[in-house]
Image (cartoon, rainbow, N blue to C red):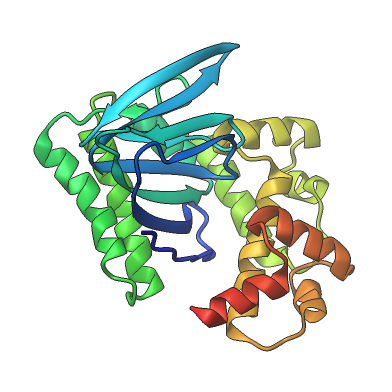
Amino acid sequence: MKNYLFLNHEYFDITIYQYGSQQCRPYHTFGPGMRSHYLIHCILSGAGTYCTSLGGRDYKYQLHQGQAFLIEPNKLVHYYADGEHPWEYMWIEFDGMKAKEYLNQAGLCQASPVYHPVSDQGRQEFFGYLKQMLESPQSLPCELMGLSYLFFGALIRSSRNSKQPVKNNIQDFYVQSTADFVENHYMEDITVEDMAANLNLNRTYFSKLFKKITAKSPQDFLIQYRMNKACELLRSTDLPVSQVAQMVGYCNPFHFTRAFKKVLQVPPKQWRKSQSSH
C-alpha cells in the first residue's frame, strides 16, 4: 500500500516531491530504471536487494530491516524484495540546493548508497520523523517541512559514515544571492547570463561553480523554481494554464507545458486534476 503527497513548495534548500510507504510482495521489483530526483528508502521489516553501477562496475547490496538506501537522480538502478521475507519500507523523494550537501554530510552517495546507523536509538529517531510525516497528512506545509529538516538532521547524526560539514562562506554567498535573484525575477525573461551578471561572474565559471555546490545547473534551478510557483498557482487558483505560464516567465504556453511535464512527469492540466482529487 502506498501513500502519496505532492508538496512542491518554494523552499530552496529542500523540495519534497512525495513520500509514502509500501508492504511489498515477494520479488516485487523496480527497474532497471532511473528516478528524476533523490529518493531514500527506509526498511521497516523484511529484506531485499539493491543493485546499481559505478564506473562500469555493477554493485549488489543485500539489505534488511533498520537499513536505508539512497537513489540518486538519473542513475540506473534495480531493486527487488526478498522472496521469503519481502521488505516493507518508507520512502521520500526530494531535491533542492542543499540535498547533495546533506547527503554528503551523512556519507551517502552513489559509491556508498547504504545507510548504517551508529545506534538503534539514532535509527529510530531518523525513521521516526518520516513516520510522523506519513501519519500527519493534514499537517500544514510548514510543519511538514520542519519534519523534513529534522529527518535530514537525524540522518546526518545517526549515520555511521557521517562527516563534518565543510564551510565555505563565499560559495554560500553565491548560492544564496542566486536564489534571491531568481525569487525576485523568475516571472521575467531571465537567463543564466543574467544570473551570472548579478554576481559579476563569467557565465561558464558561474555555471560550473553553481553545479559543483548544488549538483544542479543554474538553468535547472530556474526551471525548478518556476515549476514550484506554477504548482502553487495551479493548486490555489482557477487561472488557465496559458496565464499561469506567463506568470512564471513563459511567453509560450507550449514551452511551459513541455518543461512542466519534464519536471512533474505529467502535463499541467492533469497535475491540477490530481491535486483536486486529493
Residue 144 image offset from top left, x and y in percent: 35, 65
Residue 133 image offset from top left, x and y in percent: 30, 62
In this picture, residue 210 sits left or right of residue 114: right
Q: As displayed, is residue 25 above or below residue 136?
A: above
Q: Residue at x 78, y 32 (%)?
A: 204
Residue furthest out toward the bottom = 238
Q: Nearer the viewer, residue 172 or 270?
A: 270
Q: Residue at x 24, y 44 (%)?
A: 154
Q: As displayed, is residue 36 above or below residue 18?
A: above
Q: Nearer the viewer, residue 207 or 39?
A: 39
Q: Nearer the viewer, residue 138 or 213?
A: 138
Labels in figure, total: 0
In this picture, residue 96 sits left or right of residue 261: left
Q: Nearer the viewer, residue 162 or 188?
A: 162
Residue 4 image offset from top left, x and y in percent: 44, 63
Q: Residue at x 65, y 50 (%)?
A: 221
Q: As displayed, is residue 150 above or below residue 266?
A: above
Q: Quadrant of residue 143?
A: bottom left
* Image quadrant containing the N terminus: bottom left
Q: Is residue 180 visible?
A: yes
Q: Residue at x 61, y 58 (%)?
A: 180
Q: Quadrant of residue 102?
A: top left
Q: Is residue 181 visible?
A: no
In this picture, residue 125 sits left or right of residue 98: left
Q: Quadrant of residue 121?
A: top left
Residue 273 image offset from top left, x and y in percent: 62, 78
